[in-house]
Amino acid sequence: MGEFQITDIRPVIFVGLLFGFGIIEFLLPRRTLKPIKTKRWITNLLIIFIDSMLVKLLFKSAAIGVAVWAEVNGYGLFNVIEAPYWLAFGLSFAVLDFSIWLTHVVSHKIPILWKIHRMHHSDVDIDASTGIRFHPFEIVLSMCWKFLVVLALGAPVLSVLIFEVVLNGGALFNHSNIKIPLKIDRILRWIIVTPDMHRVHHSVISREYNSNYGFNLSIWDKIFSTYVDQPEKGHREMTIGLPDWQDEKPARLDWTLMVPFKK
């Protein structure tokens, strides 16, 4: 399978999952969303379009292409040392997942990064479309960081491909407004971040939005004591977004793109 075919797989799966979760949350909603849902979806879809165009303009390849290049040229840990493929695959997946968790924590702790990342948090509701709502600045920084991690690891190409698909699918899933039976949610969150677990992270309450940073594996928040089990006001009554921006402005594209420059 050539690099063109490999890099072609991810966007197809991504689009399918986005609209798939959108349909499921329409049929099985966890919360009643505000009337501006259509406006939010249009804005969030336009944001991912802008992000995609910027990535194509600035980067010749995705993280998968970096993995291919590192493998061909012998760069990175697992292209230098001899290790069983299963070990290289598993460790690469885990380290990549931890690196995304770590950048998420850092984006909340460093003021200039928070100014950028808060665009994601400014959404006044949370559903599958929130999982694609990231400022172009954040996407560029995230790509650069991911490239460095993949290159340093010499991560197997297949592990990077699967990680990218799982990461994107996980972000759409755990941002979705899907009602999952509590018993099943309890089981799932031992391994992965569920919608109920991540929804806490989008609360207006500071203690809650500075918790549950995971996008895929739930283990990191539990290891580093950043895990909050449930929102203080319950999932149906909690307020989503940021305290200062509880109106329709975050549903506007122009306003949204200017968030990093707002006081």
Image (cartoon, rainbow, N blue to C red):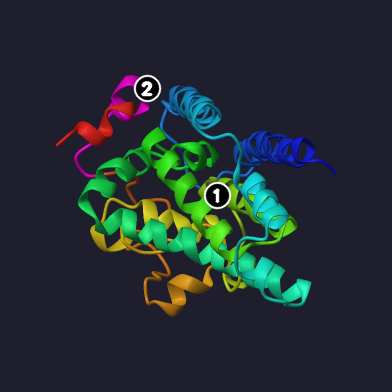
What is the span of residues highlighted in magenta in the rendered image?
243-256
Q: Is residue 43 above or below residue 194?
A: above
Seen from the viewer's position, the closer of residues 154 and 112 is: 154
Of mark 1 and mark 2, the one earlier in the sequence is 1
| Circle number at residue 38 | none
| Circle number at residue 171 | 1
Identify the residue at image location x=32%, y=20%.
254
- State which quadrant residue 140 falls in: top left
- Residue identifier under label 2: 253
Identify the residue at image location x=37%, y=22%.
253
Identify the residue at image location x=58%, y=34%.
60
Using a 10 Å C-alpha cutoff, classify the residue at mark 2 as few (fewer than 14 neighbours), some (14 to 19) or many (20 or more): some
Q: Pinpoint residue 101: horizontal percent, then vertical percent.
A: 45, 62
Answer left or right for 61 relative to 242: right
Q: In which quadrant of the rendered image does the C terminus lie?
A: top left
Q: Is residue 175 above or below residue 44?
A: below
Identify the residue at image location x=74%, y=56%.
158
Q: Is residue 219 above or below residue 174?
A: below
